[in-house]
Image (spheres, helix red, strand yellow):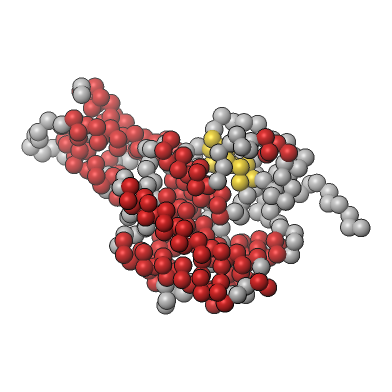
């Protein structure tokens, strides 16, 4: 590999805006595997403090450093921008026009849906630019049906596609066994999710077996975190398995506000899990989209009353202008 490729990579890394230092960037856990290669390139380019000359960079080092260059360049390119753009928090309904296509990836979602949130978090984690269009599930726009089955649907399928299509920020393990174990864990954890739906949206049908399944799922998660010994399930950086289960956990925290104090995730019992939740809330991909327990509780209450308030977060002038039908 020629010197031009090496110098081009170094220029990308060393001319970053706001004087971001490469030495600081590579301290992030996500770049740990590339540190030796980057150190060699820094010393060969004069980008670090003068020290005795080192051996010329090997091709493997150059390839690794170029991988860092691509990832850092992508991160910096998107740093000043928000992950997504959306017309408003308004959920479009029957009769509303389809927003003009902006040339980006476009995700149709419902703001309070945990499954849609999985894909939002993955898009964010990969630093992808996309448009987000919210849809009223009780009065779906006519044009929505034109995308199905042409469009990719189901969050699991969408997220696998995104991880394979945009591999610059990989979110799954390179080990096929670990990827399989992650999928198995998610399936086992879904028992707790079913209990949440019963508690939040069908309180009269909530059974002791639901409570048992809920805490069994939380205990399973806590044991898995302890067994893996990493900050997140994926590693010391969050991955697809974390972005898959976190939306459920985000909503679990609303249960005490919905009259289910026995479903609180208390630190005295779930210390490792609570620490995990706090760490996930501080992940940039999560922080932009995260909603409080109070907000989730308000939406659940509106839905159980038969009037799901999809637009409760919308402050735009376009919200709620359609007159409601008069009650007979």
Can residue 317 be seen here? The reply is no
- Tell whether 50 sits left or right of 238: left
Residue nearer the viewer, 242 or 12: 242
Q: Does 22 appear above or below 45?
A: below
135 or 84, which is in the foreground?
A: 135
In percent of width and height, residue 175 lies at: 30, 47
Residue depicted at x 13% and y 37%? 50
Image check: 262 left or right of 10? right
Asked where in the image residue 267 lies, by quadrant, the reply is bottom left
Q: Residue at x 31, y 61 (%)?
A: 228
Quarter the N terminus occupies: top left
Left or right position of 6 against 152 = left
Choose top left, top right, bottom left or bottom right for residue 282.
bottom left
Q: Quick one: quadrant of the C terminus?
A: bottom right
Does residue 136 lie above or below 211 as drawn? above
Give above or below for 224 relative to 71: below
Q: Is residue 246 left or right of residue 23?
A: right
Residue sitting nearer the eye, 131 or 202: 202
Residue drawn 76% across and 42% down?
Answer: 94
Q: Residue at x 46, y 67 (%)?
A: 217
């Amino acid at each position: 590999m020629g010197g031009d490729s090496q110098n081009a990579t170094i220029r990308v890394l060393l001319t970053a805006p706001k004087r971001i230092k490469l030495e600081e960037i590579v301290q992030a856990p996500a770049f740990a595997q590339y540190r030796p290669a980057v150190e060699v390139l820094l010393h060969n380019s004069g980008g670090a403090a003068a020290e005795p000359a080192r051996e010329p960079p090997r091709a493997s080092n150059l390839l690794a450093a170029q991988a860092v260059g691509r990832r850092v360049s992508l991160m910096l390119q998107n740093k000043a921008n928000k992950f997504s753009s959306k017309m408003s928090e308004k959920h479009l309904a029957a009769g509303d026009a389809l927003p003009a296509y902006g040339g980006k990836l476009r995700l149709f979602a419902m703001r309070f849906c945990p499954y849609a949130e999985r894909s939002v978090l993955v898009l964010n984690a990969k630093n992808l630019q996309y448009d987000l269009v919210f849809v009223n599930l009780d009065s779906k726009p006519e044009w929505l049906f034109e995308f199905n089955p042409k469009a990719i649907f189901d969050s699991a399928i969408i997220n696998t596609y995104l991880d394979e299509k945009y591999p610059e920020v990989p979110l799954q393990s390179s080990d096929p066994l670990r990827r399989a174990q992650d999928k198995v864990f998610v399936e086992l954890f879904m028992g707790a999710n079913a209990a949440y739906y019963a508690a939040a949206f069908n309180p009269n049908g909530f059974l002791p077996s639901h409570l048992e399944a809920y805490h069994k799922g939380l205990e399973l998660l806590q044991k898995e975190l302890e067994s893996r010994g990493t900050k997140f399930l994926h590693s010391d950086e969050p991955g697809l398995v974390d972005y898959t289960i976190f939306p459920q956990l985000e909503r679990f925290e609303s249960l005490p506000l919905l009259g289910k104090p026995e479903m609180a995730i208390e630190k005295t019992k779930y210390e490792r899990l609570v620490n995990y939740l706090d760490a996930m809330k501080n992940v940039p991909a999560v922080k932009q989209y995260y909603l409080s327990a109070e907000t989730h509780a308000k939406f659940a209450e509106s839905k159980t009353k038969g009037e799901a308030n999809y637009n409760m977060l919308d402050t735009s002038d376009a919200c709620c202008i359609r007159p409601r039908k008069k009650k007979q």
